[in-house]
Image (cartoon, helix red, strand yellow):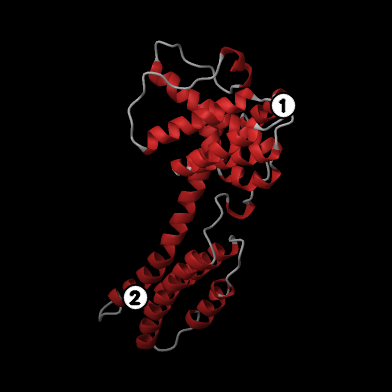
């Protein structure tokens, strides 16, 4: 699956989860309102049939609880109560009130589920990617061969600089880059391409923090660094494009060294995989 396909699939999954969340109050309150509408004199439709909306909502809520890493036992058991309450209702007036109260309870449970038990995973029940996707995986493997022996401390700062930049925490990305360059300056084996990458991220993070315009001169990789880069640089007569691709290459290089030499940061990097894939395919 390509990076774009992955992003589109996750966006589709997120939209499906949002639709299911909206379905809980829609079906429960919608059924109660329809029951109220058809409860007037002269209606040939039994309003009690619309209690099905509460039953459907209960099963939807239970599914949303099930796909979360932490299980909400209250939300999981709502289908049982919906069947008890609405399969064989006895009194019409009590049933309408019960539907409205039950719909309110389901909505409260939905809010509780979202804020106390975490967001639903992006890929539903099968959530929890454990590795990288192509072409990002292939690039990380290439960097592993071309930039061996990266210091774990520098690799950690690389992962953090990438993650912080992706989140828009530009000043913290600058601090991570400064710390990394201090570590690299003390390393026994010089790795100038990494120093350049951190310098690029640092420089452009400051420019973004200050909302500054494109500078006349900016830090770039050298011609000798081309084999380490994920993307070819645009020609020099397109400074804006070259400026952007330079940053993308720097972020991807830091992502790769973080993945290769700082296993403790894999979770952070997996969370940022969509952003990295966009950089590789844009």
Secondary structure of residue under mark 2:
helix
Residue 178: image x %, image y %? 54, 37
Q: How far is mark 2 from mark 1, CA to CA?
A: 76 Å
Residue 73: image x %, image y %? 59, 74
Within-10-Å neighbours for mark 2: few <14, some 14–19, many 20+: many
- Residue at x-position 52% and y-position 58%: 119
- Residue at x-position 54% and y-position 72%: 75
Q: Which residue is mark 2?
A: 35
Question: Which residue of the protein is positioned furthest toward the left in this rendering?
Answer: 41
81 relative to 16, above or below: below
Residue 60: image x %, image y %? 51, 64
Q: Nearer the viewer, residue 230 or 207?
A: 207
Image quadrant containing the N terminus: top right
Q: Which residue is mark 1?
A: 189
Q: Earlier along the polypeptide chain: callout 2 or callout 1?
A: 2
Quadrant of the rendered image containing residue 193: top right
């Amino acid at each position: 699956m390509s990076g774009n396909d992955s992003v589109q699939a996750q966006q589709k999954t997120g939209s499906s989860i949002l639709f299911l969340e909206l379905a809980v109050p829609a079906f429960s309150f919608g059924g109660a309102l329809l029951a109220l509408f058809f409860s007037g004199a002269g209606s040939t439709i039994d309003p009690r049939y619309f209690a099905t909306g509460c039953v459907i909502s209960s099963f939807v809520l239970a599914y949303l609880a099930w796909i979360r890493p932490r299980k909400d036992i209250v939300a999981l058991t709502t289908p049982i109560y919906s069947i008890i309450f609405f399969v064989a209702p006895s009194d019409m007036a009590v049933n309408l009130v019960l539907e409205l109260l039950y719909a309110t309870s389901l909505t409260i449970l939905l809010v509780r589920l979202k804020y106390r038990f975490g967001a639903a995973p992006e890929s539903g029940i099968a959530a929890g990617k454990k590795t990288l996707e192509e072409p990002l995986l292939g690039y990380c493997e290439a960097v592993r061969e071309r930039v061996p022996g990266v210091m774990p401390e520098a690799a950690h700062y690389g992962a953090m600089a990438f993650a912080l930049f992706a989140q828009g925490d530009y000043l913290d990305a600058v601090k991570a880059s400064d710390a990394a360059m201090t570590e690299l300056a003390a390393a026994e084996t010089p790795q100038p391409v990494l120093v350049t990458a951190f310098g690029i991220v640092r420089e452009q993070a400051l420019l973004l923090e200050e909302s500054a315009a494109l500078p006349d001169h900016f830090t770039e990789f050298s011609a000798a660094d081309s084999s380490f880069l994920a993307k070819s640089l645009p020609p020099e007569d397109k400074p804006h494009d070259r400026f952007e691709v330079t940053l993308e290459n720097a972020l991807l290089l830091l992502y790769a060294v973080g993945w290769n030499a700082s296993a403790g940061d894999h979770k952070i990097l997996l969370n940022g995989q969509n952003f990295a894939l966009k950089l590789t395919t844009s």
